Image (cartoon, rainbow, N blue to C red):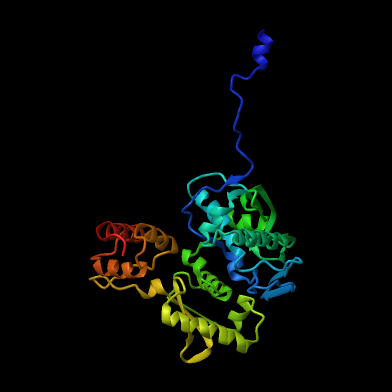
Amino acid sequence: MNEVIRERSPLLPDRHQTPDFFVCDIFDASPKGDMASMEHPIFSLSTKPDVRIRRYENGENFVEVQPSVKGLATVHDRDVLIYCISQLMAAVNVGKPITQVLRFKAYELLVATNRATSGDAYARLRDAFDRLAGTRISTNLVTGGQEVYDNFGLVERVTIVRETREGKMQEVEVKLSDWVFNAIRHNEVLTVSRDYFRLRKPLERRIYEIARKHVGRQTEWRVSLEKLQNKCGSSSTLKEFRRLVGAIIEEDEAHGHLPDYSISFDCDNDSMIVFRSRAALSVVPDSEGQKVAPLSADAYHDAKLAAPGWDIYHLEREWREWMTEPPRDAEAAFVGFCRKWYERRGAP
């Protein structure tokens, strides 16, 4: 009897062991993208299957992207990675453990990335998984302090865990590549605007990513049209690329639709493109002539949640004009201002 007691653990069995995957359940996670693929043209701008092998060089760094028979992963396929990165970073920020394997409901990904939820949308999502898993990358770019020279996929594995009788996927399991996971673990990511998912044109999305990576907290950033074309990964002629960018500039001048940044040709040199931070341009002095630094994308995200439906840049101007002295925590103060604004006025 004593031997039985010694062999038997005093603990109850662990009936619900921690799974070897991360369950995506953070519904208001800020959209985030990895810096490396914001900097370099990993994703195709084409809406048709793109089966060309691409190699890009920038100084000593190179990226070679190899498609599968279904073509390269597209800029719109990137939504899957943004969703996965966002979920993991939100978990890290609240102290939750994360893994390289994620499990999520396909419906929630579609909603979070502003996609339709029809049967065709699920079919397009399945195609996106195939292209992400099939696209292979060789590079010497550094993520997480490591140089990666081997050939790898953006996504190492995709498994549809549950599927309805109608063929709609319910749960999906994705294993991210070491390259992407290293970027997450070392916080080499940037928050992107939720309005990114509302941009229709692949080139608009790519241009926004480049601006997000390079403008940062500066007032503006300039780049030659030729270098911008290379960063976008566009296969158009330079003349055609100028026309495409010019059309986006005209629309932005008319509607201000690009999130966070405006874009224009340099008035003195039309071979240069100028990106300007809408936030930095809205900075106004307080009553003593002091300025509050530009706000981060996270602050705008929180402000939009605090005052749904309101133009956040309009509220920022109201807040900056209302201030009498710079607050200690400008971003918390701005979000609090937006919350009170909404409580008093409701939806616009």
Residue at the far front in the pictured view: 166
Name the residue located 24 percent from the left edge and 58 percent from the top edge: 344
| 142 with respect to 207 (left or right) | right
Name the residue located 25 percent from the left edge and 65 percent from the top edge: 323
Residue at the far right in the pictured view: 69
Name the residue located 33 percent from the left edge and 61 percent from the top edge: 334
Q: Quadrant of residue 316?
A: bottom left
Count of marks overlaid on the render = 0
Residue 278 visible? The answer is yes
Q: Residue 182: x percent and y percent? A: 62, 55
Q: Is residue 25 above or below residue 31?
A: above
Q: Residue 300: x percent and y percent? A: 40, 63
Quadrant for the C terminus, please.
Answer: bottom left
Q: Quadrant of residue 62?
A: bottom right
| 159 with respect to 76 (left or right) | right
Residue at the far top in the pictured view: 1
Q: Residue 120: x percent and y percent? A: 61, 62
| 215 with respect to 307 (left or right) | right
Q: Quadrant of residue 65?
A: bottom right
Residue 186 visible? The answer is no
